[in-house]
Amino acid sequence: MTDQQQTILIAASGAVPALIVMAYFDWLDRKRPEPRSLRRKAAFFGMLSVIPVLLIDGGLMKAFAGKAEAAGPYHVALFQAFIVAAMVEEFCKIGVVYWSVWNKKEFDERMDGIVYAARAGLGFALVENILYMSQQGDLKAAAFVWTLRALLAVPGHAVWTGIMGYLVARRRFDKRGPGFLGGYLIAVFLHGAYDVSIFLQVPLRADGMDALAGGLLLVPLVVTFIGWRTIRRMARTALKLDDASEAASGHTATKSAT
């Protein structure tokens, strides 16, 4: 195998974790699954959301990065984690859901909010992961990065956007909960906390605070664990409420498989 072929193979492997997590959310929604065409649409436009994210991030970095750098490396880490990464990415990902599937007649259940939002988040994660994997120089480094991102970053994108999807769906169908704004703030907090613990590694270690830096590496594990438990609980609640709505209506909902 040539070096070029190896690089292509490593990069392509970055798509696998997102596809696996997509299949998991489809399994959760197996009783009344969404049309494959709409699931693919949400994922596809989630992939395309990388483009506005890059454009907005570029503008933010030009406008404010100098001020953050002048304030010091810790401010840079906070700016990049919560503003450049979390706020922009989560807005673009949930924007995909509103733009592509929100007004579709098939979006008629609470669980649909989780499914479509998770799909959009995973579409973004798929592209991001391929880009990360394409930068790995050898198989050992690639295997390490692949494993970490498969267990943490990729599910994280599904969870953060999925939480927003659930909360906007609850607001839509039940007129309850914090809706978009509350879901967005929760997603930004979780995403930002995940990223800032990583971005702070360099300045902390440069200042000799290795113990604190090492402790912060637990944050992505904790955030992903809490987020995963939260989205599973939300999915159970959504399915229970959707079952009750179906029973109250006196008929079984059917959706096209295409």
Image (tube, rainbow, N blue to C red):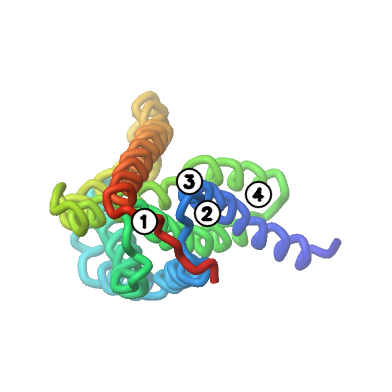
| Of pointers 1 and 3, the one earlier in the residue sequence | 3
- Residue 69 sits in which quadrant? bottom left
Quadrant including the C terminus: bottom right
Proximity of marks 1 and 2: CB atoms separated by less than 8 Å: no
Residue under the point 35% across and 36% down = 233
Report which residue position mark 2 lands on: 22
Proximity of marks 2 and 4: CB atoms separated by less than 8 Å: no
- Residue 12 sits in which quadrant? bottom right
| Of pointers 3 and 4, the one earlier in the residue sequence | 3
| Of pointers 2 and 3, the one earlier in the residue sequence | 2
Residue type pointed to by label 3: Leu
For residue 28, the mark is 3
- Residue 249 sits in which quadrant? bottom left
Report which residue position mark 1 lands on: 251
SS at mark 3? helix
Mark nearest the camera among 2 and 3 is 3
